[in-house]
Amino acid sequence: MNKEAFSLEAVTAAANADTLRLLTCGSVDDGKSTLIGRLLYDSHLLMEDQIEDLKSDSVRHGTTGDEIDFALLVDGLEAEREQGITIDVAYRFFATPKRRFIVADTPGHVQYTRNMATGASTADLAILLVDASKGLLTQTRRHAMIVSLLGIRNVVLAVNKMDLVGFEEAPFRAIEAEFAALAARLSIESVTAIPISARAGDNVSMRSQRTPYYSGPFLLEHLEKVVPEGTAASGPFRMPVQWVCRPNADFRGFAGPILSGRASRVARILIGSEERQSAFAGQSAMLTLADEVDVSRGDLLAASDARPQLSDQFAADLVWMDAEPMLPGRQYLLKSMTRTVPVQVTELKYRSEVDTLERNAAKVLELNEIGFVNISAAAPVAFDPYAENRDTGGFILIDRFSNQTVAAGMIRYALRRASNIHWQALSVDRAARARLKNQKPCVLWFTGLSGSGKSTVANLVEKRLFASGRHTTILDGDNVRHGLNRDLGFTDADRVENIRRVAEAAKLMTDAGLIVLVSFISPFRSEREMARGLMPEGEFIEIFVDAPLSVVEARDPKGLYARARSGEIRNFTGVSSPYEPPIEPDIHLRTDAAEPEALTEQVIAYLEKTGRLAGD
Amino acid sequence: MSDRLSHLERLEAESMHIIREVAAECRNPVMLYSIGKDSSVMLHLARKAFHPAPPPFPLMHIDTTWKFREMIAFRDRMAKEAGMRLIVHTNQEGVKAGMNPFDHGPNYTRVMKTEALKQALDLHRFDAAFGGARRDEEKSRAKERIFSFRSTTHVWDPKNQRPELWSLYNTRVHDGESMRVFPISNWTELDIWAYILREQIPIVPLYYAAERPIVERNGQLIMVDDDRLPLNGETPELRLVRFRTLGCYPLTGAIESNATSLEAIVAEMIAARTSERGGRLIDKEASASMEKKKREGYF
Ligand SMILES: Nc1nc2c(ncn2[C@@H]2O[C@H](COP(=O)(O)OP(=O)(O)O)[C@@H](O)[C@H]2O)c(=O)[nH]1
């Protein structure tokens, strides 16, 4: 690089140059930061005060003695400077007169999969660093696998620290050959191996005299020449609608990024205020259509002679990026282009081991694991296979509750409904519905005399559950008798039938995943036992709402006891019909001895203690 | 015509895409407008993204009351031209307390900028705020996402950022949480100038060289923009200067220059090899100070 590169003409020319986005990956200490720092330094992009800072930093923190430590240029955050490691993806910029470069710099340690996948998703080319004195490591295999999975077709194998092996040919060739075999296995099409020394500068931004056996390009030369492989320009037209622009009745524009192909047969094409004859892949355009069609955000405008696939069932590779593991059957949001739909992973077909490239059966995907899955969406999604178009075939998954981005996905192919037999295997059952609500369903059965306070406590308990995000409902004696059980009276037979119907209804509601609060006098033990018998072990919780007859009769909120005593109401529990108190209730509430709030607390405490309120 | 986009076209398209995504997905976005060249480019991109309609969100300026007068005039003109509502917010508590850049140093920045910004975001309940920061400006910015998640207290946690894949942005936040969105993250200073040149984007006249009243302090050329600047026996001299960055006038150093055209500015910038924020006194603090400020909620 020379100073003329920074003339005004060169700047304007560089603005018209194209961009290469690249990813650098290597294990800790392979020299990645040093390499990037050197590229920045050699391209004269540093300002004088940055160079001054670098020199003083090199003395203070550097690992290179009196020499400049280029790695310090790119070690960004305070925390990682102290620890001497790179913790996240960072983006760097440098330029030559021919090209502008955007470097995604990703670290080589534990979080590598998540960070590398992120950096790789937008990269045209990947530089894989290998330490010549150490050869290919497990990490190199991981990196190569992720590069291949994320669809980067151009790979540079930078064999670094050649100075440590005396710039000899043999170690270089051995690493080159070993990697070629790996690349073939991973279907990486184009690999360029270059022997370099990031620290000394050999074959980085100029040809080294110390590697006469190497006739290929030096690194920067290669980066300037490589043709970023992309099907985007030549592919069929694709533009997801981001925004519908209606400033007045005469204009209805559809704004969006052109992800592949070229728009030409539409009514008008605008880029800003400029009217264009055509627009092509990479541009953010505004189109108007000749026909009045119903198009809105989330729709995909596509060439009619080369349509995308449209399916609500498809197979995809997933890179899991969240500390909470991926669970088949749980609902996530899928964002693909401008469309967001609820989805479930219906089947985890296998997990790929990044270190060995083996495929193993697995039940869940943990953070940084990679799997191949079937996905079922709540609505059809338009896409092209990821191998054909990264932008129309890639998606992210979002957790509905934490809002975190939990996975990166790459669609392989659509599943025909009939062929997706595993969807039936994962039937929508009680457990699945409960999981969707992230709760454990149960019946809270409040029994006790009229006026004992069942409804009061049940209502308070429901409020508490609702406030903590639980899905609940209440079946209350009075209400049910006005509807479902309208035909029943108060004879013993009708009382039994009354409870039977309520118990069955409560069971259906727990099947739907709800926590059901039943508030019925339910005077007979045998019917309460019948209700308990309908429910799985532990899901029927009998709550005895207890107050002496004298107390409830004194309360008599609805004046019912008075009417019962006068004989106006017959078969009234406690007066003219028996109440059989529970012998061993799960919860015993004394409403004559405590306030409703305290009793509510007692119920909640019981539910917490028995683990009924834990999520899955 | 080749179907391969130039570097600037690719940046432009990416930024427009980001801006539209926010408009479509966020409930109540706002564009922070600091009146500088980066803001000018960002505003231009927003207008391009929605043309022929005006951008569907307001502009907001955090006014410390110590901005150059020419900046304020330019701000009002640009908002009007863009057809956008302009919100101007000043931390009145700071004004009452008599906060000024001379006596209160770093506290001044915290109260009049960081606190003021948080106040304004809370007041209007914005769930997304565009900012014109670039990743090449400063090391800690290089790691920040384009969509930068902020907690209910506006805090940035560098260890807990959402991964950003392809051009798919996760804009979802809970009530009270928000996003800072940086649509020109991937632009360099050079790109900004090249684009201003190409698109003929209007910028504040202070960027062009002119004779201005100047006093010299600690090697910095400070412009006497009004009579609030205490002069300790100094006499302002008329000097031919311009500004490379714009902020509060008592904190912003000018450089001597005779660049009176955009072309001359760019040529000069290329020749001068000092990094951009050097002109701002605020950055002469510890080297990791920006990261600390960002964690507190500064842009
Ligand atoms: N001998 C030699 N050392 C190097 C070379 N490149 C980097 N290093 C050293 O290797 C160490 C790790 O380098 P760094 O760039 O921090 O590695 P990173 O962890 O991959 O970013 C540092 O001490 C560097 O100075 C090289 O080409 N030759």
Image (cartoon, grey):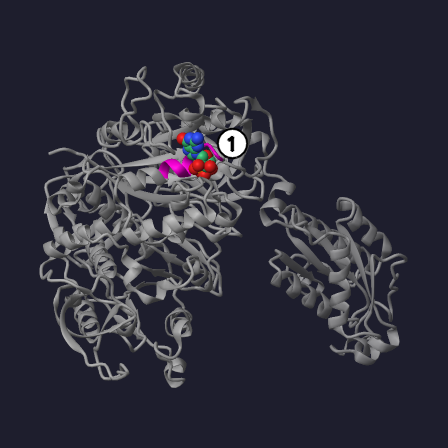
Ligand 1 is found in the corner quadrant, namely top left
Image quarter (top left, top right, bottom left or bottom right) of the N terminus of chain A = top left
- On screen, residue A525 above or below A38: below
On the image, the x and y values in percent for residue A550 come to 88, 77
Chain letter, disc 1 residue: A
Residue neighbourhood size for the residue with mark 1, other residues' Cα within 10 Å, grouped as few (<14), some (14–19), many (≥20): many
Bounds of the magenta segment: A29-36
Examine the rendered structure and indicate whether residue A519 appears above or below residue A189: below
Amino acid at pointer 1: Ile
Q: Is residue B220 above or below residue A219?
A: below
Classify residue A312 as left or right of residue A326: left
Q: Is residue B135 visible?
A: no
According to the picture, the residue beneath numbered tag 1 turns out to be A370
Which residue corresponds to the image point at 29% horizontal and 78% vertical from the top-left? B65
**Total count of labels:** 1
Residue A520: percent from the left, percent from the top?
A: 75, 62
**SS assignment for the magenta stretch, majority:** helix
**Viewer-nearest residue: A14 or A388:** A14
Taking A492 as reference, is B214 left or right? left
Residue A243 magenta-drawn?
A: no
Question: Residue drawn at (60%, 29%), measured in percent from left and top?
Answer: A362
User: Vertically, is A200 above or below B198?
Assistant: above
Q: In this orientation, which residue lies closer to the viewer: A515 or B24?
A: B24
Q: Is residue A425 visible?
A: yes
Residue ranking furthest to the right: A583
| x and y, in percent, of residue A159 in the image | 40, 25
Which type of secondary structure does the marked residue at label 1 adopt? strand
